[in-house]
Image (tube, rainbow, N blue to C red):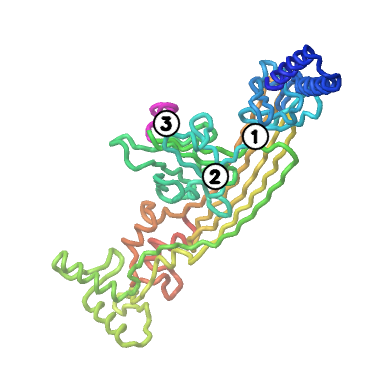
Amino acid sequence: MKQNLLNYCLTGTVQKNIGRNTRPEKLILLLFLFFMVTTVGFGQQNVRISGKVSGTDGNSLPGVSIVVKGSTIGTVTDADGLFTLQIPQNARTLVFSFVGMKPQEIAVAGNTVFNVRMEEEAIGVDEVVVVGYGTQKKANLTGAVDQVTSDVFENRTVPNVTQGLQGVLPNLNIRMMDGKPTQAPSYNIRGTTSIGQGGSALVLIDGVEGDPSLLNPNDIASVSMLKDAASAAIYGARGVFGVILITTKNPEKGKTNITFSSNFAVKQPLTVPDFVTDGYTFAKMFAESFINGDGSFPQNINKEMKFSQAYLDEFKRRVESGQPYNEVEIDPATGEYIYYGSTDWFDLLYKKATTAFDNNLSVSGGGDKSAYMVSGRFMKQNGIFRYNTDDFSTVNLRAKGNIQVFNWLNIDNNTEYSEMKYFNPIAVGEGAVDIWNLIGVDTHPTSPMFNPDGTLTTGAVYSVGDLWYGKNG
């Protein structure tokens, strides 16, 4: 507009000067200036461009924004991905942008036709949270959601996912029941929320309710926890106690990737109860507690082992003498064994440490129309019992892939196979009672493991003896 106004003024001036018989030199100069200005104005005329925008799959993209960089001149593609636009002749760069696609800047360079293919923009897992049946950026969340990624499982030889999640997500309470690696745990969010109705969270694996103890921790991409009642709007009444969403890794398109990892671990108990293992201390405290409770001196420790004041006095004499003494004597009158031992039965039951190893192998790849991922895991954890030990091993296989058959047909596959082997040697003695109960009731520090002839003592027969023989499991 400024240039057009200047042209008009000069034209008026020329006409005015002509009317006054202006000299020819001035007239020629004015005509020359008029020619130069109109030429510049003509050079700033707009240029019409057109083109088509499509995605990586070749399908047209409607609604793509095309803007001349550094200006407000722009347009959007129609339903067929086509566009036309008038741009200044001096425009240098076009900017193409679309939600979920990488923005592109393309030089004009005198071209009038632009066919652009946009690439999908990969959003990092740490920027996105799984909510319900979709995903959402963390910045847009309004509900109470926590999420962890696969980093929490890396370089950790854990038998199952649950042990890897303990202490990682705030307000997630995990109960391991009896602690067995095959035990399906109980997930609770924010404590007890209902009287008589449990309060266990809903656990979904790739959108399907399942047992996380069957998963390979290395297959997990993210674990999200929906902590408030808003989850009930998506999952109904089953989601009122919160929802745990476990998402497994997806195949990555491109060149074939082969990943192998191996972990070896040495494990030992962090907290060991401090039991009374000194035989005389136990015998003295047993007699005192019995007298305080029943008002009389005990006649036996249990149905197998006799007890008396003379026995306690002899035990005291041997301990205070400071000399080595036999832990097992034979009563000359009855031929029965008399025990003066100091045995740590839990030390005989448990190893000081145990080992575990975890091997993982995954293969992934694909092209424009298909992608695949196959992963496998073999994990073995040696038991902590000294005899007839409680070994655990697991095998996990997962096959995941997709094929784009047509533009409107995509076939997905997600198959998992899990196998666990666990030797559980805790049912022993009379009535198949657990071994810890039998140690507390029938086995005491005064009794050693073996008799002088190599046979098991009565206390050992009722507890660790069955493990030593390998009779139970």
Give, as a three-letter code, the residue at label 2.
Answer: Thr
Over which residues does the magenta segment extend? 229-241
In the picture provided, is 301 more to the left or to the right than 175?
Answer: left
> From what the image shows, is residue 254 above or below residue 321?
above
Choose mark 1 or mark 2, whichever is in front: 1
Q: Earlier in the sequence, mark 1 or mark 2?
A: 1
Q: Amino acid at mark 1?
A: Glu
- Counting from the top left corner in percent of width and height, residue 331 is at 31, 78
Residue occupied by mark 1: 121
Between discs 3 and 2, the one toward the N terminus:
2
Q: Which mark is residue 231?
A: 3
Q: Which residue is mark 2?
A: 149
Instruction: Tell me the amino acid under the disc marked 3.
Output: Ser
Residue 368 picture location, percent across and down: 74, 31
Residue 447 at x, y = what percent?
A: 35, 71
Secondary structure of the residue carrying tag 1 is loop
Q: Earlier in the sequence, mark 3 or mark 1?
A: 1
Name the residue at 58% across, 54% down.
155
**Residue 419's image quarter?**
top right
Our reading of the magenta stretch's main secondary structure is helix
Does the magenta-highlighted stretch encompass residue 309? no
